[in-house]
Amino acid sequence: MAKPERLRKDFERVIAKGRLAHSYLFFGPSRNESLRFAELLAMYVECGMWKSEISLIDAKVFDCSEDSGIATARELKYFFSTKSFGTHRRTAIITSLDKLTLSAQHAILKIAEEPPEHALLLATAGDPSTVIGTLASRFYAVYVAGEGRTLVSESALRSAREAIQLASGRGLGAFLKELLENDTAAEEFVTALFTIYSDRKKYWRELRPLVYRWSLMQQFNTNKKLQLEAALLSTHQNRNS
């Protein structure tokens, strides 16, 4: 989506309207930034303030190390089985959902499919494409740009929408070549695409190739134009298949 300040305003509006969902998956260039925002959101839900020094009574962080297993899912189930103490929500934050074992992910899927009314499940992932599809589809995917990165602009959103339209015909390659003149422009363009496709339940077909190509761009010195062109062409094919 955008920089944390922008996300705070978005979530404030959602909460004020009573439309907060049960599950959100935060991801982006920094796992720490994603976790930081999830923790701040938990604080806002419980206390109405975006402050990190507040001690929470209805929120818990489940720190998932490499190959965390079924015990994490059991702890999560027990956590949600107890009633909230001072608020109407019990908030669980799962760090690195993508590092859980497959058996643990399947166990958490059972919770995410029918969450208790008071449950709020926040998760982070470095690479959302490695989370099993059935579990990922239960979360609203939220892209968190790091501190200091540029907010997605209206011009970037217009460019992203134009590129999506060009994917159905010709001219996409030339358009991207001119648009992606530097790394900053490329990152803002990707952020704009994630903003447009932020509803994972609705756009899971479009997000899958985009997340995969974005992951390659983060890990390797790849040609950004070619990667994004391939992602957009794949999203168009998936949308019409």
Image (spheres, helix red, strand yellow):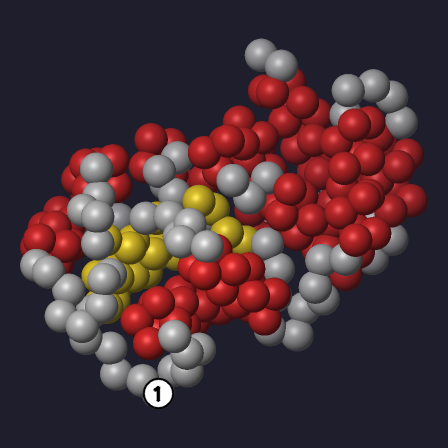
Height in image: 84 above or below 229?
Answer: below
Q: Quick check: 227 above or below 141?
A: above
Seen in the picture, residue 177 relative to 66 is either above or below; the reply is: above
| Residue 27 seen in the current view | no
Q: Quadrant of the N terminus?
A: bottom right
Q: What residue is shown at x 41% (from left), y 82% (from top)?
A: 51
Residue located 53% across and 27% down the image: 205
Q: Quadrant of residue 167?
A: top right
Q: Quadrant of residue 55?
A: bottom left
Q: Residue at x 45, y 68 (%)?
A: 37
Q: Give whichever of 237, 222 is nearer the camera.
A: 237
Report the side of 50 relative to 58 (left or right).
right
Q: Nearer the viewer, residue 128 or 12?
A: 12
* Residue located beneath label 1 in the image: 53
Residue, x 43% and y 59% (percent of image)? 15
**Residue 49, position as x, y percentages in the image:** 41, 78
Q: For the view shown, which residue lies furthest in the top direction?
A: 241
One can see residue 215 in this view? yes
> What amino acid type is highlighted by mark number 1?
Glu
- Viewed as shown, does residue 79 lie left or right of 153? left
